[in-house]
């Protein structure tokens, strides 16, 4: 990984392996239960969403990386980049574990546009974390304003394309708005 020491790369790989092991112990399927592995799956309302390597929500995970990098530069300015990245992987991994717990799976089904959501495959969770790493490392090499513009573009693009994005996803999980849910269902 560019900008990350060998030690940092090994720590990142170990954290990804630990995430996969925990998800496996939780009973998450390694790949899509449909039996296929695809690079991209673009149908949100389907049984393969959040099961393949990438989907519309991969853009949100890149933005997670942007945010984690920005926070690390504010809060961990003196730490090497690999330490900040390891913490970001830990936070993203913790989210992936929580996201695949029954309480969050049920919450998604209740209040978001993820009707019938059954959680992520291990492949998708590890890939989501990989997209976060990509965003983190990209942000480490870009000017802050370029990172912000790309994040806004991703949010607007997914909002226009699938009527969902990181902002709406968080809003609907934390404080659902029925009008937003109805608007999302209309797409």
Image: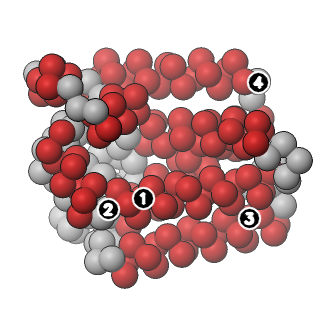
The answer to whether residue 48 is left or right of residue 17 is: left
Residue positioned 18% across, 54% down in the render = 106
In this rendering, the label closer to the viewer, 3 or 2: 2
Query: Considering only vertical position in the picture, is 37 above or below 79?
Result: below
Secondary structure of the residue carrying tag 1 is helix
Q: Are marks 1 and 4 in contact (CB under 8 Å)?
A: no
CB-based contact (under 8 Å), mark 1 and mark 2? yes
* Residue neighbourhood size for the residue with mark 2, other residues' Cα within 10 Å, grouped as few (<14), some (14–19), many (≥20): many
At 78% from the left edge and 57% from the top edge, which residue is drawn?
82
**What residue lies at 37% left-to-right and 81% top-to-bottom?**
25
Q: Quadrant of the C terminus?
A: top left
- Measuring from the top left, give residue 73's x and y in whole percent: 77, 39
Q: Which residue is mark 2?
A: 100
Report helix, strand or loop for mark 4. loop
| Distance between the alpha carbons at the discs numbered 1 and 3 | 20 Å
Q: Which residue is mark 3?
A: 9
Nearer to us: label 1 or label 4? 1
| Left or right placement of residue 180 versus residue 18 in this view | left
- Other residues around mark 1 within 10 Å, as few (<14) / some (14–19) / many (≥20): many
How packed mark 4 is, by other alpha carbons closer than 10 Å (few <14, some 14-19, many 20 or more), is few
Instruction: Please say if the residues under marks 2 and 4 sit with CB atoms less than 8 Å apart.
Output: no
Foreground: 186 or 83? 83
User: Which residue is tagged 4?
Assistant: 143
Side (left or right) of 106 relative to 124: left
Q: Going from the N terminus, do you reach mark 3 or mark 4 first?
A: 3
């Amino acid at each position: 990984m560019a900008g990350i020491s060998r030690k940092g790369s090994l720590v990142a790989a170990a954290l990804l392996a630990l995430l996969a092991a925990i998800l496996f112990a939780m009973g998450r399927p390694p790949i899509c239960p449909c039996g296929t592995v695809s690079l991209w799956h673009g149908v949100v309302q389907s049984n393969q969403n959040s099961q393949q390597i990438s989907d519309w929500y991969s853009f949100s995970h890149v933005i997670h990386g942007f945010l984690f990098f920005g926070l690390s530069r504010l809060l961990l300015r003196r730490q090497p980049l690999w330490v900040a990245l390891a913490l970001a992987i830990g936070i993203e991994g913790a989210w992936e574990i929580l996201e695949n717990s029954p309480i969050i799976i049920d919450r998604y089904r209740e209040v978001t546009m993820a009707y019938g959501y059954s959680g992520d495959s291990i492949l998708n969770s590890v890939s989501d974390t990989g997209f976060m790493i990509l965003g983190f490392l990209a942000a480490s090499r870009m000017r802050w304003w370029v990172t912000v513009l790309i994040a806004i573009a991703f949010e607007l693009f997914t909002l226009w394309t699938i009527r969902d994005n990181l902002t709406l996803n968080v809003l609907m999980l934390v404080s659902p708005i029925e009008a937003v849910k109805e608007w999302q269902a209309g797409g």
